[in-house]
Amino acid sequence: MRILIAEDDLDISTLYKKALEKNKHQVVVTSNGEECLKNYRTTLKNMASKELQPSKEDAAATETDSFQDFGAKFRKVVDTNVSPYDVVILDYSMPGMNGMEVAKEILNASPHQRIIFASAYVKETLEHSVKELKQVVELMQKPFALKQLTDTVEDTEAFEELQELNVNVDHIKEADLTHEQILDLLDKLRRIQKNRTF
């Protein structure tokens, strides 16, 4: 898997990177929100450019394409379910641009991107993600064991279940949740993540 991490604590990010690379994942570590977002945008743009490269058969036709045709092709590539990373792990609380601000920008560019927040305060993070992102994202309560990190990242089934939850829960779209609804979502998220992260 390709994994992008934003974590301002160098010791913690080094541990994350080593644990994930030990399981043969490709890991890119950034030290703050701005750097993470810059990396994400550049990688997404490069990915879209590669997708837009014409085959030899289409080369002659591409030369006659207008700028509008190119723009339409670019939007089509960006609007697909393809994301530049399999997982983006964001420290929720970073100086400067925090994890929520980064997640919002990433999801605006690539709505199907899988995001995992690492936070000491999962209830507050969940509530904030619903209000700001209009969806539930995966959470890991700090501190956590490195095995929990690798298990969570590799559990793509949990992400698929979470996508279903986001589609089927209308009040998430409204982002006007009661305390009981937040606790219910927290419980559902806990079950989806197999009680391993909080």
Image (cartoon, rainbow, N blue to C red):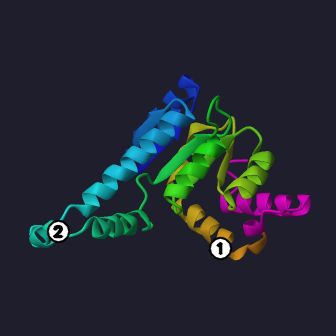
Instruction: Name the chief secondary structure element in magenta.
Output: helix
Residue annotated with mark 2 = 62
Residue annotated with mark 1 = 167
Q: Is residue 141 above or below residue 54?
A: above
Q: Is residue 144 above or below residue 50?
A: above
Please indicate whether residue 151 sits to the left or right of residue 57 in the image.
right
Q: Which residues are magenta?
A: 172-198
**Can you give x and y, in whole percent of width and height, for residue 56 in the image?**
9, 67
The structure residue drawn at horizontal position 89% and vertical position 61%, both measured from the top left corner, is 178
Between 141 and 34, the one lying in front of the other is 34
**Can you give x and y, in whole percent of width and height, for residue 174 in the image?**
77, 67
Please indicate whether residue 176 sits to the left or right of residue 47 in the image.
right
- Disc 1 marks a residue whose amino acid type is Val
The structure residue drawn at horizontal position 70% and vertical position 40%, both measured from the top left corner, is 119
**Can you give x and y, in whole percent of width and height, for residue 51 in the image?**
27, 62
Q: Earlier in the sequence, mark 2 or mark 1?
A: 2
